[in-house]
Amino acid sequence: MRDFAPLPDGTHFEEILYAKSDGVATVTINRPAAHNSYTTHCLVELAQAFTDASRDDRVAVVVFTGAGHRAFCTGGDVKEYATEYVKRPRDYWKYMGLFRAYLESIMHCGKPVIARINGMAAGGGNESQLACDLAVIGEHAWVGQVGTSVGSVACGGATQWLPLVVGDRRAREMLLLNPRIGARKAEEWGLVNAVAPSVTHGGKFVENATEEQVRLAQDGKEGWAIDLSRLDLKVAEYVKSLKEKFPECLRYTKAQTNQNKEAIWHATVAHAQEWLALHFTSPEPQEGMRAFAEKRPVDWVGLRSKWSEDRSPEYSWGAPGAKCGKCGTNSMPDGFSFCGKCGHELKAR
């Protein structure tokens, strides 16, 4: 049917790469300089690609990955958050609608989706790989959540799905403490299906590489390097096996296996969308996102002192209770010493 015609091969996208060959559609976030974080526009392109792969009868399997070897995906572009959504929190509700459509395009894709985790999968990147059906990770990579460290809540998949995947206690550890979960532990916890050696020294693979060896390999120093060929072999192994299964049976098996994931997602995500948009009006994301964008430490002491001293922590400069005795302007922050309109000195409260 014409309305379901697939995108022409070689269709150009701005922030992703999309290729179809030999029954495999490969979707790649192509923003390596930004650690493959996704912008608002990138979410639109990703959803379009997964929807196309779902409808293209030539496609048997979808592989989802990131460009390069440092990052699979690190979630939303925090610089965009800081410059756009902190200024216009109402637009974050619209953004979350796009994010929901993106994750659901993976979950509802009529083909199995394999996450090829070629580097760190942080924040929304971990939520992205959780939306996939299978995941293979390079040994140099790690997964983790960052919400409580940057002024947000990981309720775009992580709070919903991590308890299903790793259990309650491990989910709380990831969500509350935000540790980096290395590739081997990720496999042990069930976050991924398999680990592929990816660190080499002198051209030979080194299994169970240390953090220092991974760092040297990432930097390409002293004969160390990252090699993703074993990762690709493992992905190819999964692809081959899936292509030897009945396509309708695969699709319905996926739909049935998604039952619990879908139930908790649809029970919570609309509420999450509303809360996150409202929360963007508060000082927490303003401080967290700006600190990240400015590459400085978060002012934890300053934030917490507002709570302990009852200085209206919900507002950046105090509750909107000040009124100018000269011009009558009201609802100014209690922390203001002078009227923001006429400059008249305000009475101390």
Image (cartoon, rainbow, N blue to C red):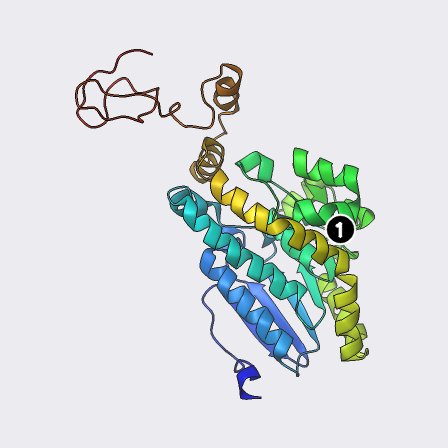
Q: Residue 84's spot in the image, x, y percent?
A: 39, 47
Q: Looking at the figure, which quarter contains the C terminus?
A: top left
| Res. 247 image quadrant | bottom right
Residue annotated with mark 1: 191
Specify whether 253 is left or right of 148: right
For the point 80% across and 80% down, the residue is 246
Is any atom of residue 201 visible in this view?
A: no
Which percent across, then down, holds residue 149? 57, 35
Q: Quadrant of the N terminus?
A: bottom right
Three-letter residue code for mark 1: Leu
Residue at 26% across, 12% down: 347
Q: Quadrant of residue 230?
A: bottom right
The furthest residue to the top: 348
- Of residue 2 and residue 123, the one placed in the foreground of this image is 2
In the picture, measured across the screen, residue 69 lies left or right of residue 238, that is left
Image position of 17 with respect to 125: above or below: below
Note whether 72 is above or below 325 in the view shown.
below
Q: Secondary structure at mark 1?
A: loop
Residue at 72% in and 69% down = 112
Kindly tell me whether residue 2 is visible in this rendering.
yes
Q: Is residue 231 above or below residue 219?
A: below
Number of callouts in the render? 1
- Bin the neighbour count of mark 1 within 10 Å (Cα to Cα): few under 14, some 14-19, many 20 and up: many
Give the side of residue 177 with respect to residue 90, left or right: right
Closer to the camera, 68 or 248? 248
* Residue depicted at 52% across the width and 56% down the height: 97
* Residue furthest bottom as drawn: 1
Residue 10 x/y as whole percent: 51, 79
Q: Compare residues 316 and 42 and report the one nearer the observer.
A: 316
